[in-house]
Image (cartoon, grey):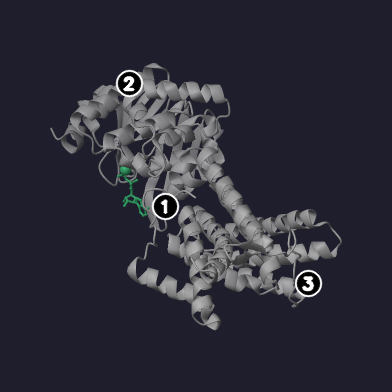
Amino acid sequence: MSAEFLQFLFSGVTLGATYALVGLGFSIIYNASHVINFAQGEFVMMGGMGTVFFLGLGLPMPVAILAAIALTTLFGFGLERFAIAPARGASVVTLIIITIGASIVMRGLVQVVWGKEFHAIPSFSGDEPIMIGGATILPQSLWVLGVTVLLVLALRYFFEKTIMGKAIIATSLNRDAALLMGINVRLVLFISFGLSAALGAAAGILVAPITLTNFEAGIMLGLKGFCAAILGGLGNGMGAVAGGMIVGIAEAMGAGYWISEYKDAVAFILILLVLFFKPSGLFGKTGTERV
Amino acid sequence: MLKIENLTSHYGRIQALHGVSLEVNEGELVALVGGNGAGKTTLLRTISGLQGASGGSVSFEGTDITEMAAERRVNLDIAQVPEGRQVFTALSVEDNIRLGAYTKSDKAEIAADMEKMYGRFPILKEKRNQAAGTLSGGQQQMLAMARALMSRPRLLLLDEPSMGLSPVLVMEIFSIVEELKEQGVTIFLVEQNATAALSIADRGYVMETGTISLTGTGEKLLNDETVKAAYLGI
Ligand SMILES: Nc1ncnc2c1ncn2[C@@H]1O[C@H](COP(=O)(O)OP(=O)(O)O)[C@@H](O)[C@H]1O
Ligand SMILES: [Mg+2]
């Protein structure tokens, strides 16, 4: 493996991990409601911008991060309670349009309240590159990867081992049968939006020290995460993780070996190819709809 | 125990129930028979709360539950085995059964109940780690029943448990239904298989196009000329 290739791979998996988290957020909400939440990217942005804001208040980093995640989670809950729940019974397309509206509102709010400037969050543990096999990796990339792995494992545990997680899967599989079990499906939807928002915020915070953030940072991250979710088969959590990695690595290789201006196009070319040849996603959705 | 008065229900502008009144007393096994499209499933779904009522009332042990959310009715000890089983296909057999006790919190009690279900339906124990969607129709029916029983219901609503099953399996399902009745569970059994249902029922109702057209003891209905002609194929 050449050092150059390894270098592209490092940046690919870092990006990929971020897209994976965003894609997971799409999958969780999709499973619970069959809604594609186009405000997912704004959750990501709000995580980063929220951290900037709380750091600005003089809070220590860990506190600022938790506060930003909490704030974003509140927005997730609010989106469900005040925009999605009142439209109960509306078509899925209507709900999707509502999420697009919500994304515009969130971007507008952040722009008005926190401004348009780009901000950097300090790296969690310095900026001293680490040499591996002739290539370098930023400590922040290791944070991105490590936390992503932990979050994915925690989610798997939640959905496979806890009764609440199973109730969410049951609701996504058969809403009526879930109601007959006594599962409060509105609560499931509420929790799913909160969980997705928290995941999105985490992704936004992890990547902000590498990519900078501003009120529009969520648009591209949201779209890439959406590509990851589609690539893995909408609603398939582990598929979204794999999809995120594929998009991230393809993008980094495309930028490295091809033309860096077109790196954003790579994700969309991938998604078109997948939709054309295998519309259910690379990993389909057969059998297990678990995250 | 269950009292339904003048119940109506609509699907958009289509009216499926035209003023249904009936009663199920504690400890009884009551059968509801009727042809395809008569409104039996709609009635059961209105009792369990999956389908809204547009008029009339459903009361359970004296409390009006017409407007109560479906998920809260489970806490009153009402359980439904829906038409077409509706198991959680991608989840394991064990997870399906466990979700039946979603409203329960006593871990030891849940574990004991699961063992009970495995004792009653040994095939489910054998397939406990398999996805429910891989089970045969009869096995899925048993799973749907086990799942419903996990909530320890006092009123069990069964929607065509014999649908699509071989005669041997139908016998097995019906003997389980009788056994549950003996254990004190009140049962409201919806069936197109009128002969089988009426022969184990204390009382029965015949439903036609959204209304009750006939009622009486199971035996009386079995011997009724119009019932014979319309539903028993005699
Ligand atoms: N989801 C639905 N949308 C519209 N009409 C329905 C729906 N489900 C049932 N119906 C209509 O309601 C009537 C009663 O149906 P149903 O309760 O399923 O009858 P049964 O269980 O006795 O076969 C039928 O005329 C049927 O076409
Ligand atoms: Mg029916």
Residue at 74 percent across and 54 percent down: it is A66
Report the residue marked by disc 3: A113
What amino acid is found at the position of numbered circle 1 in the picture?
Answer: His
Which residue is pictured at 54% across the width and 70% down the height? Answer: A8
Q: Position of residue B149 (x, y in %)?
A: 43, 28
Residue at x 36%, y 52% (from the top left corner): A286
As drawn, the label of residue B178 is: 2
Circle number at residue B10: 1
What percent of the width, then of the height, locates residue A172?
47, 50
The answer for how far apart the CA atoms under marks 3 and 2 are is 67 Å
Q: Quadrant of residue A212?
A: bottom right
Q: Most extreme residue toward the top, as rendered?
A: B182
The foreground one among A148 and B125 is A148
Residue at 73%, 63% in the rendered image: A123
User: To which chain does the residue with label 1 belong?
Assistant: B
In whole angstroms, how far apart are the C-alphas of marks 3 and 1? 48 Å
Query: Residue A135 is drawn in which quadrant?
Result: bottom right
Say if mark 3 contacts mark 1, CB within 8 Å.
no
Q: Position of residue B89 (x, y in %)?
A: 37, 43
Q: Chain of mark 3?
A: A
Label 1: how many residues lie within 10 Å, few (<14), some (14-19) or many (20+)? some
The answer to whether dots 3 and 2 both sit on one chain is: no
Other residues around mark 3 within 10 Å, as few (<14) / some (14–19) / many (≥20): few
